[in-house]
Amino acid sequence: MDYFAASLALHRKHHGKIAIRGKMPVNTKDDLSTVYSPGVAAPCEAIAKDPEAVWDYTIKSNTVAVVSDGSAVLGLGNIGPLAAIPVMEGKAMLFKKFAGIDAFPICLATQDTDEIVQTIRNIAPVFGGINLEDISAPRSFEIEERLQDLGIPVFHDDQHGTAIVVLAALINSAKVLKKDLNDMKMVINGAGAAGVAIAKLLKGYGIKDPAISVREIILCDRKGVLHADREDLNPSKRATLVFTNPNGVSGSVFDALHDADVFIGVSSANLLHADHIRTMAKDSIVLALANPIPEIMPEEAYAGGAAIVGTGRSDLPNQVNNVLGFPGVFRGAMDARAPCITTDMKLAAALAIASCVPQPTRDLIIPASLDKKVAQRVAKAVYKAAMGK
C-alpha cells in the first residue's frame, strides 16, 4: 500500500483529522441559558472565588496542548508550523483514542526560545498538560526546563516518550537473550532530544532508586563519538559526558560499534550496513528508529548477525512507537494532579510497557501500538509513582 498517497487523500477528504464537539445539548432556551448566559456566570464566579475549582468546572482536567514550532518534524526537519499541523493533529487524535484525553495542536509561528516559553505560559490556564513536540535540540531542553514551574506536566515527547519506549524494548530484549541489561555496552547515534533522553534514562540519571543503570553508553552525533577532547560540543552535549563514554572512547560511530551489545539509532536513514553489525557483540540488539527510513533495514541487520531488531515503522515487527507511552503517561500524571513528570514516573511507564509482553520473543519485544490496554497499564503505574505508592 502506498501510505503517502493514501494519507494525502484522507487528509484532503476530511480537511484534517480532529474536530471539537459539545458535551451538552443546546436544543432549547433552557439549554442555552444553562450552558451560556445567564447560567454560565455560576461556574465563572465559583472559579474566581477558588481557582482550584477550574479543575471541576472546565475542560482543564482533561485537556493537553500539543505544542510545536515546526523546527524538527519527524524526519523532515525544519519545515515550519504550517507543515507541522498534520503531525500535531495526529498526536491529538492518539491522545483521544488511547487515553480519552482531549488534545489540540498549537503550532507557533516563532522559533525564538523566549517567545515560545512566554506563549506557553500565556495559554497554560486552559490546559491540564503541555506536550512539547518536534522542537529542535538544544532549544527543546531549555524550553522544557523553564516551564517546569507551571504546576502542570510539561513533557517533551520526542525526548522522554522515545526514551520510555526504548527502555521497555530493551528490558524485554534482554529477557529474550538472557542478558543483564545493566552489563551491556550501548551506542546511541543521534545526540539530539531523543538520544540524550534515552542515555539519561538508561543510566538511571535522576531516579531515586535506579533499577536501570547501564554500564557503558556511548553517544554519537554527525561528527562521531562525544568525548571530552572535542571542542565543538554545545553545552547540552558536553553535559552528557557526566553519564556517557566512561572510557573516553573517540572516533566515529562505526568505531564505537565494535563489541557493542546494542545500537540505538535516532538519526538518519541508511547509516549502517550488515558489515557494521558484524563488528558488534554476539546476539546484538539493533533499534534503528529513524523515520521514515531506518538506519538499517531489519533484513540487513539480521544478515549481519543481529539477534533482535526494532524500528519506528508500523509496517515492520517490533515497532518502537511513542504512542505506547505518552497517552498513559499524561493520563496517569493528570489523574494524580502531578505538577510535573518525574524520572521515577518515566521508569514506571517503561516497566509497565514491558510488562504488557509477559513472554517476549525475538519478533515481539514490545506490545502492538494499537493495544489500548497498554495506556491503561501505563496510566496506573505513573499514577502510583506520582502518588508515591
Image (cartoon, rainbow, N blue to C red):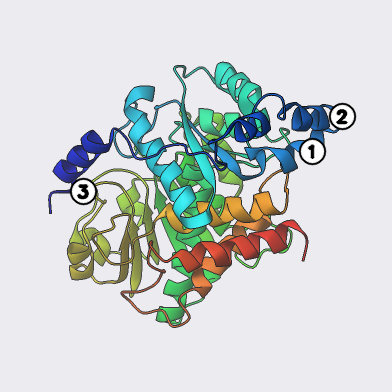
Residue 333, given in percent of the width and then of the height, sits at 66, 52
| Residue placed under numbered mark 1 in the picture | 53
Of the pair 176 and 26, the residue shown nearer to us: 26
At label 3, which amino acid type do we have? Asn
Q: Is residue 279 above or below residue 334?
A: below
**Left or right of residue 134, residue 350 in this image:** right
Q: Residues within 10 Å of mark 3 (few under 14, many from 20)?
A: few
Q: How far separated are the C-alphas under marks 2 and 3?
A: 59 Å
* Horizontal side of residue 190 vs 5, given as left or right: right
Residue 299, compared with residue 332, is above or below; it is: below
Observer able to see residue 383: yes
Identified by mark 2, the residue type is Lys
Res. 49 mark: 2
- The N terminus - image quarter: bottom left
Dot 2 alpha-carbon crowd within 10 angstroms: few under 14, some 14 to 19, many 20 or more: few
Residue at 51 percent of width and 17 percent of height: 112
Q: Position of residue 304 (x, y in %)?
A: 21, 67
